[in-house]
Image (tube, rainbow, N blue to C red):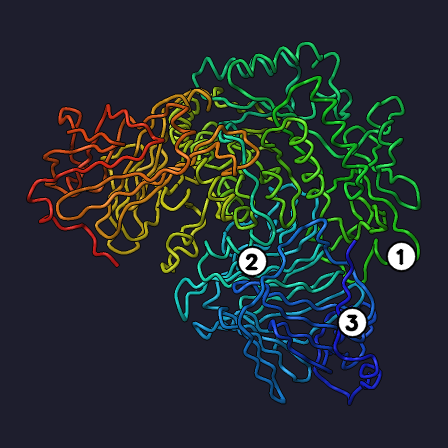
């Protein structure tokens, strides 16, 4: 375990000479304690400061005055500010003399700071020390005031990004507090989860509690399953769209108070470890953030198919019937899941011998695999203490469980009394791998769903006498009621391997289980792991997918799913979905129909319901089945696009599902949108979120947008504007923006079958810029995307209108893989050519061949408003793994037709 103790240039002689108590100061931060307002702390002063050749600033801080509220103050603090990268600034503040808990590299590996070839620029006065480096956009300023503070500004805009001058720093054994002022009307904040919120943009005047808990996601504004103290700040001025990110890397519980003009952190342990990411765009911030915490793990191709689950399937025969009824209804189904029903008395790695016997389950999974389908079971962390249970016996023999008072801690979950594996213990990681291996040798499942890993506990243990860990002096707003943090979880006084208290690693438990499960599956299958975890932490996306948890079958929950999914993307977990049709309670036909219309475009698309609720498989209602076939048909045509977005997420951290401002950061109207989202750069989903609605008000950023269900329908926005769209019961609006090229394939019942269909290239022209797109291709299960073995292909497309000609071409990397698969582009559809444009002739160049195009293969038609021409070229049979160029000569009058909008 790594503990923080920073080296100081100041000698302890200097420390000893610093007066511990100065003149009485009246300023301080106040809080209500026992019904009375009391000063919590007075802050610190700078005793010593130096800057080294790399630009790293080191300061010694001493306490101004003691306060006993929330415990004694730490007398001396060390502060370092270091430019780890040109676009990443790190500020650490910790006890100068006594090591404290901080997240070690062994748990969350982070890249080493980059060397700076040029010396920093340092300015020191009596009141400030200012540091910057030549290639960074940051300026760090330490203010030698009473109390001290620091600010971070952006060189290029002179905008202040972080400013602690408004309130003093408080640093106690179990309570840290600091604040940053914000320009309330220019700063637009997103993130700080996990919570269910009605809006994606954080509303002013709220407290966001971070403490992992088994609290159902249908509860708004409460701390849920994950801890992500990261926010993105998109500024509407002084330069529109300029974006930065802020991470407090701390695994302890906290409240974050956000008033609009200030953000205040109140943390019950650890250190202050701040990372600031300069952006200056949302996409750049995600690249910088995930470079630090870990790039999202690639998902197998099959994971982008449609999934079905229910808590409450009675037996394997019923599960088999569900698969059969999807097939009979001609609705795609890729993965069948089982909840805890399949287990023997809810014990992990077992099968109910009566309802889910091994032989029948083996036959069931074999049939799925023969159909090109997959199977995923649930696993909970609590291990039953049944003394005849083999997994328990092996766990005891290997001594892998979390302890309290020297004995394995006894909790209670679904199987009754349980012990919890200590995933910090290397022996527990080996134990977990072995149990997964043993179970998969019996039943060849394709992924693992890990639940209840906050960790959930059906009992609340008594606090240990004499310890403040189970009931710390400051009570975070756990569950919205300031309940003790010992409630319904592993007690904070429980001990992990390395003498680490659960108090410090509670929020890491799900992260550590996901990490162990990921590596176990990789070891056992030698393929790309699929793990779905409910509990998460900073960096969980490196190991697992996520879903929003136990939502409810309500219209509000349908709407809330969009902010939740967008937040997960910000947290570096792009493979995210919500339980389609709602988990808790009875759904309705209309709600389920609207939910599958939206859920078909979640990155992770799964129908899931709770025991005792009505059955809600898509075939249960004719209208839902019909809508499901339509939207899943488009999803399966877009599978190459979804998979390419996964590749982009793995390469640079950008989410699959994105807020509109990721593509249009200068359009401030996009900042407050919570009812629409983008897939990638330019596919926009605008769902119906209210009962009885047959239209939807959708915001369109500037440009031409085309309906992906009907290319002859389009929307033109000269400037960003809200448009009322028709949305009858069987329709969701999905549009693609000009300037994009998307590679699609055919509809099918499984992803495997869809991959065997020809490619269709959708080219959306723009007079303002070249159109671009790409498709990433591999076998769908290789553990590494884009690895050095070259078993993959990347094809980049571009299209441009110039001098009366349209040129569409590809650029291929590692084309051999795609060539071996014999994948071809059979059809190209061109959208966005304006009225009056006709193709006189076309030429196809591929390899050494140049072919005059057959004009009989071209079909053109006007769109509904007769503004655009829809052109389709069929029967091309172009090998996608070989570069090609298609030149289309347009009629002489083509360039006379004006573009419907003015390029900005």
Camera-side mark, 1 or 2: 2
Separation of marks 2 and 3 at Cα, in angstroms: 28 Å
Where in the figure is residue 776, as x and y percent of width and height? 43, 36
Judged from the image, the secondary structure of the residue bearing numbered disc 3 is loop
Camera-side mark, 3 or 1: 3
Residue picked out by circle 1 = 467
Q: Which mark is residue 680?
A: none
Residue sitting farthest toward the left: 892
Circle 2 Cα neighbour tier, 10 Å, few/some/many (<14 / 14–19 / ≥20): many
Q: Establish if 834 lies above or below 748.
A: below
Separation of marks 1 and 2 at Cα, in angstroms: 33 Å
Residue name at image x 50 percent, y 68 percent: 136
Residue picked out by circle 3 = 96
Judged from the image, the secondary structure of the residue bearing numbered disc 2 is strand
Q: Establish if 15 lies above or below 156.
A: below
Where in the figure is residue 808, as x and y percent of width and height? 24, 39
Decide if residue 499 is on the left or right side of residue 773: right
Q: Nearer the viewer, residue 83 or 394?
A: 83
Decide if residue 781 is on the left or right side of residue 44: left
Decide if residue 268 is on the left or right side of residue 495: left
Q: Which mark is residue 231?
A: 2
Separation of marks 3 and 1 at Cα, in angstroms: 24 Å
Circle 3 Cα neighbour tier, 10 Å, few/some/many (<14 / 14–19 / ≥20): many
- Which of pointers 3 and 1 lies earlier in the amino acid sequence? 3
Camera-side mark, 2 or 3: 3
Where in the figure is residue 514, as x and y percent of width and height? 67, 39
Where in the figure is residue 753, as x and y percent of width and height? 43, 20
Circle 1 Cα neighbour tier, 10 Å, few/some/many (<14 / 14–19 / ≥20): few
- Which of pointers 1 and 2 lies earlier in the amino acid sequence? 2
- Which of pointers 2 and 3 lies earlier in the amino acid sequence? 3
């Amino acid at each position: 375990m790594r503990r923080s103790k920073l080296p100081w240039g100041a000698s302890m002689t200097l420390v000893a000479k610093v007066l511990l108590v100065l003149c009485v100061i009246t300023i301080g931060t106040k809080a209500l304690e026992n019904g009375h307002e009391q000063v919590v702390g007075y802050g610190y002063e700078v005793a010593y400061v130096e800057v080294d050749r790399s630009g790293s600033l080191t300061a010694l801080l001493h306490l101004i005055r003691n306060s006993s509220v929330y415990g004694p103050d730490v007398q001396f603090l060390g502060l370092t500010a270091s430019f780890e990268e040109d676009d990443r600034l790190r500020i650490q503040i910790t006890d100068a003399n006594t090591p404290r808990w901080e997240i070690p590299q062994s748990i969350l590996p982070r890249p080493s700071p980059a060397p700076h070839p040029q010396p920093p620029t340092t300015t020191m006065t009596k009141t400030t020390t200012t540091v910057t480096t030549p290639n960074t956009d940051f300026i760090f300023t330490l203010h030698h005031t009473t109390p001290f503070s620091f600010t971070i500004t952006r060189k290029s805009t002179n905008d202040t990004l972080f400013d602690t001058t408004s309130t003093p720093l408080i640093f106690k054994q179990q309570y840290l507090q600091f604040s940053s002022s914000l320009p309330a009307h220019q700063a637009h904040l997103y993130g700080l989860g996990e919570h269910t919120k009605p809006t994606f943009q954080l509303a002013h005047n709220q407290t966001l509690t971070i403490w992992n808990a088994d609290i159902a996601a249908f509860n708004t504004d409460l701390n849920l399953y994950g801890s992500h103290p990261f926010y993105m700040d998109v500024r509407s001025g002084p330069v529109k769209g300029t974006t930065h990110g802020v991470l407090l890397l701390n695994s302890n519980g906290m409240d974050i108070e956000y008033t609009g003009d200030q953000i205040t952190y109140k943390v019950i342990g650890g250190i202050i470890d701040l990372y600031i990411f300069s952006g200056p765009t949302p996409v750049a911030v995600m690249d910088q953030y995930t470079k630090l915490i870990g790039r999202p793990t690639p998902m197998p191709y099959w994971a982008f198919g449609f999934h079905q689950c229910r808590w409450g399937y009675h037996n394997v025969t019923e599960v088999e019937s569900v698969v059969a009824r999807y097939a009979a209804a001609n609705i795609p189904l890729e993965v069948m899941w089982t909840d805890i029903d399949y287990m023997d008395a809810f014990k992990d790695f077992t099968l109910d011998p009566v309802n889910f016997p091994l032989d029948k389950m083996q036959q069931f999974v074999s049939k799925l695999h023969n159909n090109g389908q997959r199977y995923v079971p649930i696993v909970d962390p609590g291990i039953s203490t049944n003394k005849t249970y083999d997994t328990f016996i092996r766990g005891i023999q290997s001594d892998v469980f979390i302890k309290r008072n020297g004995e394995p801690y006894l909790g209670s979950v679904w199987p009754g009394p349980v012990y919890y594996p200590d995933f910090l213990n290397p022996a527990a990681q080996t134990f977990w791998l072995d149990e997964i291996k043993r179970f998969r040798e019996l039943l060849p499942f394709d992924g693992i769903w890990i639940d209840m890993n906050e960790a959930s506990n059906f009992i609340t243990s008594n606090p240990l006498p004499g310890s403040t860990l189970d009931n710390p002096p400051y009570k975070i707003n756990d569950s919205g009621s300031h309940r003790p943090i010992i409630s319904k979880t592993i007690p904070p006084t429980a001990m992990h391997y390395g003498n680490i208290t659960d108090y410090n690693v509670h929020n890491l438990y799900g992260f550590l289980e996901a990490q162990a499960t990921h590596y176990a599956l990789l070891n056992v299958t030698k393929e790309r792991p699929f793990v779905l975890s409910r509990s998460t932490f900073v960096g969980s996306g490196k190991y697992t997918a996520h879903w929003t948890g136990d939502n409810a079958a309500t219209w509000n929950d349908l709407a809330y799913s969009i902010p939740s999914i967008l937040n997960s993307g910000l947290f570096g977990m792009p493979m995210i979905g919500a339980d389609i049709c709602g988990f808790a309670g009875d759904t309705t036909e209309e709600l389920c129909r609207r939910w599958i219309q939206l859920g078909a475009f979640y990155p992770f698309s799964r129908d899931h319901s709770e025991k005792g609720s009505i059955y809600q498989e898509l075939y249960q209602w004719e209208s839902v089945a019909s809508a499901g076939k339509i939207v899943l048909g488009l999803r399966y045509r877009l599978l190459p696009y979804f998979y390419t977005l996964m590749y982009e997420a793995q390469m640079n951290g950008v989410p699959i599902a994105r807020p509109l401002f990721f593509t249009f950061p200068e359009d401030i109207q996009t900042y407050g949108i919570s009812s629409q989202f983008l897939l990638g750069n330019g596919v926009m989903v605008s769902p119906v979120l209210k009962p009885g609605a047959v239209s939807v008000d959708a915001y369109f950023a500037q440009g031409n947008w085309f309906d992906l269900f009907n290319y002859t329908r389009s929307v033109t926005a000269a400037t960003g504007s809200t448009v009322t769209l028709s949305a009858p019961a069987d329709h969701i609006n999905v549009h693609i923006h000009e300037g994009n090229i998307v590679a699609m394939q055919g509809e099918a019942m499984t992803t495997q079958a869809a991959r065997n269909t020809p490619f269709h290239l959708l080219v959306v022209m723009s007079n303002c810029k070249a159109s671009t797109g790409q498709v990433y291709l591999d076998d769908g299960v290789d553990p590494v995307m884009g690895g050095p073995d070259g078993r993959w292909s990347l094809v980049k497309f571009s299209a441009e209108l110039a001098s009366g000609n349209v040129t569409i071409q590809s650029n291929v990397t590692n084309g051999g893989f795609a060539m071996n698969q014999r994948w071809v582009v059979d059809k190209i559809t061109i959208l966005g050519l304006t009225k009056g444009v006709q193709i006189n002739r076309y030429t196809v160049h591929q390899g050494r061949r140049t072919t005059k195009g057959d004009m009989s293969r071209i079909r053109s038609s006007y769109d509904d408003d007769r503004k655009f021409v829809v052109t389709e070229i069929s029967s091309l049979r172009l090998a996608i793994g070989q570069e090609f160029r298609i030149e289309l000569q347009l009629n002489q009058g083509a360039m006379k037709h004006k573009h419907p909008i003015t390029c900005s």
